[in-house]
Each structure stands twice: as structure tokens, then as C-alpha cells.
Amino acid sequence: MPDIEDESLAAVEWDGPSKSALKRRMLALQQLGETLVGLSEKQLAKVPVEDERLLGVIRQARAMRSHGARRRHLQLIGKLMRDIDAEPIENALKAMDRQRQGEADAFHRLEQLRDDVLALGMGGTELVASRWPEADRQQLRQLIGQHQRDSARGKAPTASRKLFRYLRELQENYGDPG
């Protein structure tokens, strides 16, 4: 009798992915679809989704407010994504995340530069001029002085915001040397 069991087990053996692995893959595709639903139309246009039906379902899912209907629609998106190669989509989303993170890092560096300039007072003019020789030193001195006066009076930091905008303008026009 042990021989019969061994033969039946051999005939039933499965070398494909396990049921759990299939579920994990399906859930990952569904989450990828949910990410696509959360993108703006402009961002979605940058993602290489060639399946027009999938694009239509993604756009429909955006308009859905009912939790159950949205969940079913996300499952449909996951099902449709099984039939396409999701790697280019994942790569495009990762590239968008890297770009967004780079922009956030640049924003924080600019904020830190502004804070350093304001902490140095009038000496901050030279810090900016060392990074961007094209910078208008007189405008920098005016903004720093205005910030100092506003701080002494307890006013809103409008000069600080103006300084940030000016530094961002310098960065956009002349690059980010630091």
C-alpha cells in the first residue's frame, strides 16, 4: 500500500508557486494599482500603462466613494495587472518617488541655508554670495535687515519668506552649488 500513496503523491506534486505566494503577488499588484489610482492625471500620463482598459478602470476607481465598491475595483485592477508586465510601472513609480524625494531634500537644504543666513545676520550675505556670485547683495542685506527688524517687533516673518523665495530663485536660475 505505501507504493500506491507514493505514486499518487508524485502525480499530484506541484512545482509552481504556492497559494500564499500567489496571494502575496496579487496583493502587491492590488497595492500597485491603488498607488496608480492615487496619482494625478499628469502623473499617470508619465507611467507606462499601455492597457487602455486598465487605464479606464483606474480612472473610474478615482470617482468611487463607496468603500466596498472601491475595494472591488482595486481587486479588478489587480486582476487586470496580472496580464501585463508590472515592472515598467514599478520602475516609473520608483523614479517619481526618487524625484519627489530629491525635490524635498533640495527644499530642506534651501530652508537650512535661509536659517543659516538669518542666524549670521549681515554676514549671511557673504555666505549666499560665495554660493551664487550673481546674487544681489543689496537685496540680501535689505531682506536680512527687514527680518531683524520684524523679529525685534514680534511681527510675522514675511522677510524670511521673501528671502527663501529669493534663494529659490537663485537656485533655479544658477543651479545648486551646495
Image: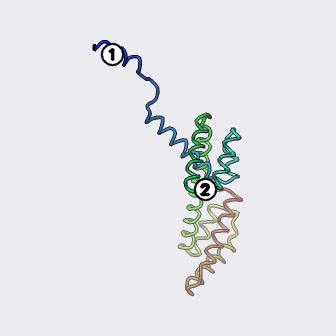
Observer-nearest of 1 and 131 = 1
Q: Could you tell me which secondary element the residue under label 1 belongs to?
A: helix
| Rendering coords of residue 22 (x, y %) | 48, 35
Within 10 Å of disc 2 (Cα), the crowding (few <14, some 14-19, many 20+) is: few
Say which quarter of the image contains residue 150: bottom right
Q: Could you tell me which secondary element the residue under label 2 belongs to?
A: helix
Q: CA distance from mark 1 to mark 2?
A: 61 Å
| Rendering coords of residue 76 (x, y %) | 59, 43
Q: Is residue 3 above or below residue 171?
A: above
172 with respect to 31 (left or right):
right
Rendered image: mark on residue 37 = none
Q: Which residue is mark 2?
A: 103
Residue type for callout 2: Glu
Within 10 Å of disc 1 (Cα), the crowding (few <14, some 14-19, many 20+) is: few
Observer-nearest of 137 and 90 = 90
| Rendering coords of residue 67 (x, y %) | 55, 56
Q: Residue at the location (56% across, 75% down)?
A: 121
Q: Which residue is mark 1?
A: 6
